[in-house]
């Protein structure tokens, strides 16, 4: 028996999924929105959660709360495990590993990317990436406990390894994280320790290219580099990270293969992403080929070639070399929603996607950010103010906005960071937290 | 060689430890404050973190931040593992399990209590207690995911087990938790689900005594009971919890040993505490006997009999049948600090501790709390307002106060709760969250 209205299944409640759902809010369809988490995360501020500025609640919204006014939408907590293209059903794992099937007439996949170590999976244990709230909490825990360890250790070499933080990757996430660790050390923690001087913390920004923020215009890159230098971040350009362990990070210079080993107890990984495993399942089922990072090719209506009923948007789609940024995810998700809504309403031809580059921004330090929007380039204080306005505007919910503005203001005025609580995540290990470090 | 100034080691940065440190701020001593966590937790609001109202940052303060103006104090992250009474040294485990020794002239132990299952340790796996930030996050995760599981399950019996929440213990923590789960279900979640009606959520309050809140006056108990009834909490009095599993809780009536089994996927444990393991180590080393809950007897100056240099305060001390509440911890910690400061300043006799009962309070529901302070009894709306003022006044830091007032106001006005983000605590399981449920 046919379903009364076309059923749309959306996998992933990130920027793409949420914007697709919004576009479909008034369409004559029934939407099922599936995510592995109960929260929609505002990823551009994840690094502020990791460095003690904002709580996970401030940079995320319960998906159900965000979509509570959508009358045609069901939210489901689960992981897309498989797809049955012939039956048009997604197989979903519940949290207890039991499964159910979600039938669709249209499928929209915006499941995003995860941290990739490109053949160096053993690095994962030592160098967490930063894609999820859990990642942010793990990084927060690593950073905060590194200072604590340094405080109780007498050996100067050991102590300096605990006070060395290596960030692999000089894109926006790496730059923001490196900058924030220095600001945390020099402002929030400066006077809180006795045996160590937190402002001595060494932050290494290890980058493969010849300038940081390669997606920005050259003069913005160089302005960001100056701000990083002033902040005390040590930038090393033209190197690959070729080794990470418990207490060191190894780089290899691209030009002459020179290897360097830095004693560092904390290494963070922002230098590679790959599509989540479901992308491979999907590609196989649809008979298309993923690109090098696992992205799935789409045509100009966001649908997969040969499968007009399946759309891929956001970071997971390969289309016109568009970058994996929030803006692309929002617009492509919105476009998939529009194509579906139009088709359900009886429109014959599908509108092609036109990406409108509204620009990108990266936070460097207090009073310094770079913003690039077409020909408009901003840096320093004006860039920083624009950055703040943009991020507050896009943050979901009046409450998150107010709370974030309040926290930012307090941190600006006093330098203090209050969201530094460490969560181990389960009661057993909280009772005896030791050994967690070894995980 | 003798240390220049007397060294005070404080174990535990809870209410007792922090208030002891404060009293010693201007004393001619060197203080080392040791805690297993980097945060001082405001335990009276832990249940609000567990039920999505407040972030862990809002109800806690970094210990270093809290004590940043103490010039005579060092903070150390570590766990007291052993004590050498003759050498006057505490053996401390660092996070990586390496050890160091902290020498003392005075030792103050306020390491508190942990959840106890009294011979039923197998319950721990299914029924978390609520003493730490991690407990609060585990409970939040259990509650939030229970609603999610119910939403995707068709079998009505299974569904109703997911929607049944059992709270063992009818003291303040149990009453507050039960009330908050009902408020969460009926107000914040009510319109956010499609297949289930969250307001149908059954909350069982299982209590051994013949009335809830036994530490309060009888008419306040009965007022609280009425408010709980109105809220839809099902109170079962005169029963012990004698079994807990993945999907059930079993009670045995005290009067006739009648057993009852409730299908329930979530059971929370607030009905017993015991001193942390270090108390046994300490008692053995000092040659004193712990009471039934592991508490350590102290004389009227808070010192352990026969050991005038060792003090025990807060929940871990057994003195004059004082209850394990925040007020006792604060005052006893303060007193130990005072005795030490006086002695160091040359005062010959130690002042005896006089507990000043400033009262206790318990939150029941919106517009209803009970407050008891000597002859002053408050309930309903006046009690609720008094409760709010008291808790804001005691919360540490202007920022936490402002944030909390803002969150409370928003939740009052709209019913929404925004701090519902689920943290698994590590990246590996965040990538595949399944199995966590089974832990």
Image (cartoon, coloured by chain):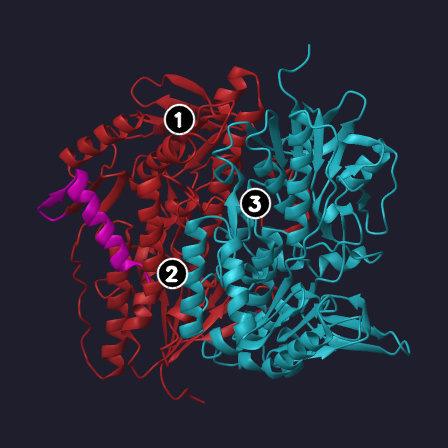
Chain colours: A cyan, B red
Residue A49 appears at what percent x and percent y? 54, 59
Residue drawn at x 53%, y 73% is A382
The disc, 1 or 2, on the residue closer to the chain's N-terminal end is 1
Separation (CA) of disc 1 from disc 3: 24 Å
Same chain for the residues at labels 3 and 2, yes or no?
A: no
Residue B334 position in % (x across, y down): 26, 67
Q: Which residues are magenta?
A: B373-397
Q: Residue tagged by mark 2?
A: B287
- Which of these two is toward me, B130 or A47? A47
Quadrant where the C terminus of chain A sits is bottom right
Q: Residues within 10 Å of mark 1 (few under 14, many from 20)?
A: some
Residue identified by numbered label 1: B199
Residue to which mark 3 is pinned: A40
CB under 8 Å between discs 1 and 2? no
Q: Is residue B231 above or below residue A129?
A: above
Q: How many C-alpha atoms fall within 10 Å of the one at disc 2: few (<14), some, or many (≥20)?
A: few
Q: Position of residue A182 (x, y in %)?
A: 58, 75
**Residue at 47% over, 34% down:** A69
Q: Identify the residue shown where x is 55% and y is 43%.
A: A39
Residue A351 counted in the magenta span: no
Q: Nearer the viewer, mark 1 or mark 2?
A: 1
Going by the image, does A185 lie left or right of B16? right
Residue B57 can be seen, yes or no: no
Give the quarter of the image for residue A146. Answer: bottom right
Tell me the quadrant of the picture where the N terminus of chain A can be found.
Answer: top right
* Residue B65 shown left or right of residue A73 in the figure: left
């Amino acid at each position: 028996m046919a379903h009364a209205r076309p059923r749309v299944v959306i996998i992933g409640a990130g920027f793409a999924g949420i914007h697709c759902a919004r576009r479909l809010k008034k369409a004559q369809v029934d939407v099922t929105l599936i995510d592995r988490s109960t929260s929609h995360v505002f990823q551009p501020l994840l690094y502020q959660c990791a460095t003690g500025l904002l709580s996970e609640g401030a940079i995320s919204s319960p998906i159900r709360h965000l979509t509570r006014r959508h009358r045609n939408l069901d939210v489901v907590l689960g992981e897309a495990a498989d797809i049955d293209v012939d039956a048009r059903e997604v197989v979903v794992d519940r949290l207890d590993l039991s499964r159910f099937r979600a039938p669709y007439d249209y499928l929209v996949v915006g499941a995003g990317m995860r941290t990739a170590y490109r053949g160096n999976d053993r690095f994962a244990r030592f160098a967490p990436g930063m894609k999820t709230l859990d990642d942010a909490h793990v990084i927060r825990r690593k950073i905060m406990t590194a200072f604590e360890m340094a405080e109780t250790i007498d050996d100067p070499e050991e102590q300096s390894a605990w006070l060395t933080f290596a960030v692999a990757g000089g894109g926006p996430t790496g730059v923001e994280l490196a900058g924030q660790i220095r600001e945390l050390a020099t402002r929030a923690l400066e006077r809180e320790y006795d045996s160590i001087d937190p402002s001595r913390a060494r932050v290494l920004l290890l980058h493969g290219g010849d300038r940081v923020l390669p997606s920005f215009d050259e003069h913005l890159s160089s302005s960001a580099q100056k701000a990083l230098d002033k902040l005390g971040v040590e930038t090393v350009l033209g190197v690959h990270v070729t080794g990470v362990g418990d207490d060191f990070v190894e780089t290899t210079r691209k030009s002459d293969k020179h290897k360097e080993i830095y004693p560092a107890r904390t290494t963070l990984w922002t230098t590679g992403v790959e599509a989540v495993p479901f992308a491979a399942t999907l590609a196989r089922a649809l008979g298309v080929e993923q690109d090098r990072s696992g992205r799935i090719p789409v045509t100009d209506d966001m649908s997969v070639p040969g499968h007009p009923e399946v759309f891929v948007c956001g970071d997971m789609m390969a289309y016109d070399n568009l970058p994996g940024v929030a803006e692309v995810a929002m617009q492509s998700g919105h476009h998939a929603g529009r194509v579906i809504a139009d088709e359900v309403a009886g429109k014959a031809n599908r509108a092609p996607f036109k990406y409108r580059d509204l620009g990108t921004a990266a936070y460097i330090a207090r009073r310094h950010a770079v913003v690039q929007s077409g020909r408009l380039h901003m840096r320093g204080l004006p860039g920083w103010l624009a950055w703040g306005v943009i991020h507050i505007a896009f943050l979901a919910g009046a409450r998150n906005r107010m709370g974030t503005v309040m926290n930012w203001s307090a941190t600006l005025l006093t330098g203090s960071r209050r969201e530094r609580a460490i969560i181990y995540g389960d009661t057993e290990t909280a009772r005896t937290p030791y050994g967690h470090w070894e995980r």
